[in-house]
Image: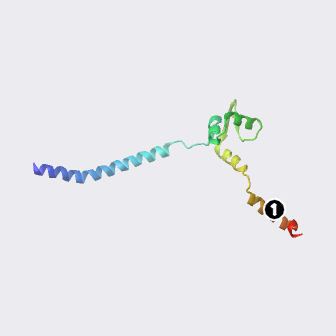
Amino acid sequence: MEQDITLKAFLKEILEPIIDDCLTRAMNKYINTIAFDQPSETGVIDISSAAKYLSLSKSTIYQLISKRRIPHYKQGKRVYFRKDELDKWITNGRVKTQEEIESEADAYIARKGYKHKSSI
């Protein structure tokens, strides 16, 4: 009986790491297969997704479309957007900081040769 217990312990000690390793490799392979087999996202989204992506209401998106202020595509009655173009549209609206404005003003004054009012 004692030999039976030691045989079970021995087999557990030998087989358990092998089984764990095999299962881990199989799961990693399965996960990688799923990740690479997914169709790549085209970056094209509908109006609901665009509204959610930009944190705006659908009615605001429709207003921007009608004023031609937001890049979009139309197919029939449907409107689509490209995420990369929406990202670019957002970054084009960047507001300069006060420091940037002052730096540009100083550079402009230096380039044009104007004297600052306080130095007159």
- Residue occupying the far top of the picture: 77
Q: Is residue 17 left or right of residue 96?
A: left
Q: Which residue is identified by label 1?
A: 105
**Which scheme is used to colour this image of the protein?**
rainbow
Task: Name the residue at 27% across, 50% down.
Answer: 16
90, above or below 76, in the image: below
Q: What secondary structure is marked by label 1?
A: helix
Vertically, is 31 above or below 76?
Answer: below
Is residue 116 visible to the viewer in this orientation of the structure?
A: no
Residue 109 location, quadrant: bottom right
**Position of residue 21 measured from the top left corner of the image (x, y, whole percent):** 33, 52
Number of numbered callouts drawn: 1
Residue farthest along the left direction in this orientation: 1
Indicate left or right for 46 with 118 as reference.
left
Residue drawn at the location 57% of the way across and 43% of the way down: 41
Residue 6 locus on image (x, y percent):
15, 52
Quadrant for residue 115, please give it: bottom right
As drawn, is 39 to the left or to the right of 8? right
Q: Residue at x 64, y 39 (%)?
A: 50
- Residue 97 in picture, x, y percent from top left: 73, 56
Q: Mark 1: which amino acid?
A: Ala
Residue pushed farthest right? 120
